[in-house]
Image: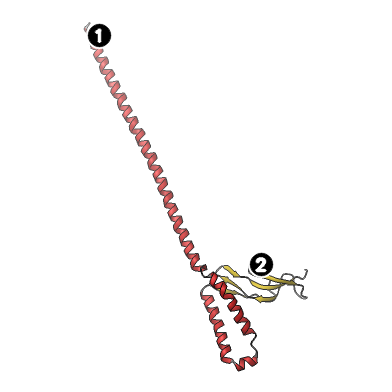
């Protein structure tokens, strides 16, 4: 009878060891699960941080672009309003006769000087004159056809008259040049 008690004691030790081993496995499983959860949370936070960083960079780039455009094109409304002043001064200079030049040389010189200064100021701010010539090819990107007429000795699409010069502000059209275009067939 003594032998069964010894075996029971050994069975109790084996059961205790098995129970302790199972408990340590459960703890390891709990730690592994917790580590996996922490890794997933870390990855999510890293992803959110990277996206926030990218959004901030994009906002900075948009702000820089808006600032550059405001610098380049912010004065376009004023420039557009100054174009009729230029047109009127140009017409005035073109209508001066030789008699008027002799009689009012100082006044006319002042008007011409003002015109040159206006063009210099335009150029300083990125405004360039579009000056098409008679015989040039019509370009709808920079010209506005005011009329079409069949003119002998011209090809269809050639400029036959320039009514007003056009203007570019950097790479944008401020006002197209106003022209007459030949409508001769062929």
The residue indicated by pointer 2 is 140
Quarter of the image that includes the N terminus: top left
- In the image, residue 59 above or below residue 8: below
Marks 2 and 1, how far apart at CA: 110 Å
Query: Which residue in the rendered view is the most extreme toward the bottom?
Result: 103
Q: Residue 54 appears at what percent x and percent y?
A: 44, 52
* Color encoding of the figure: secondary structure
Q: Residues within 10 Å of mark 2 (few under 14, many from 20)?
A: few
Dot 1 lies on which element? helix
Dot 2 lies on which element? loop
Q: Residues within 10 Å of mark 1 (few under 14, many from 20)?
A: few
Q: Is residue 68 left or right of residue 161?
A: left
Front label number (2 vs 1): 2
Query: Which residue in the rendered view is the most extreme toward the top?
Result: 1
Choose top left, top right, bottom left or bottom right for residue 180: bottom right
Q: Is residue 135 left or right of residue 2?
A: right
The residue indicated by pointer 1 is 4
User: Which residue corresponds to the image point at 30% horizontal and 25% vertical from the top-left?
Assistant: 23
Q: Is residue 21 left or right of residue 47?
A: left
- In the image, residue 6 above or below residue 160: above
Quarter of the image that includes the C terminus: bottom right
Choose top left, top right, bottom left or bottom right for residue 141: bottom right
User: Which residue corresponds to the image point at 34% horizontal and 30% vertical from the top-left?
Assistant: 29
């Amino acid at each position: 009878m003594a032998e069964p008690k010894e075996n029971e004691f050994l069975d109790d030790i084996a059961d205790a060891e098995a129970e302790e081993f199972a408990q340590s496995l459960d703890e390891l499983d709990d730690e592994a699960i917790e580590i996996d959860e922490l890794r997933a949370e870390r990855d999510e936070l890293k992803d959110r941080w990277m996206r926030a960083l990218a959004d901030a960079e994009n906002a900075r780039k948009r702000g820089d672009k808006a600032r550059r455009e405001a610098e380049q094109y912010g004065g376009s409304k004023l420039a557009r309003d100054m174009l009729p002043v230029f047109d009127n001064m140009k017409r005035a200079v073109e209508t001066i006769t030789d008699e008027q030049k002799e009689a009012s040389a100082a006044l006319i010189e002042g008007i011409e000087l003002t015109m040159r200064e206006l063009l210099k100021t335009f150029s300083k701010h990125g405004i360039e004159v579009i000056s098409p010539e008679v015989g040039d090819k019509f370009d709808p990107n920079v010209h506005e056809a005011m009329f079409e007429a069949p003119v002998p000795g011209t090809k269809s699409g050639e400029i036959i008259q320039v009514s007003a010069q056009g203007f570019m502000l950097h790479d944008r059209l401020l006002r197209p040049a106003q022209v007459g275009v030949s409508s001769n067939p062929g």
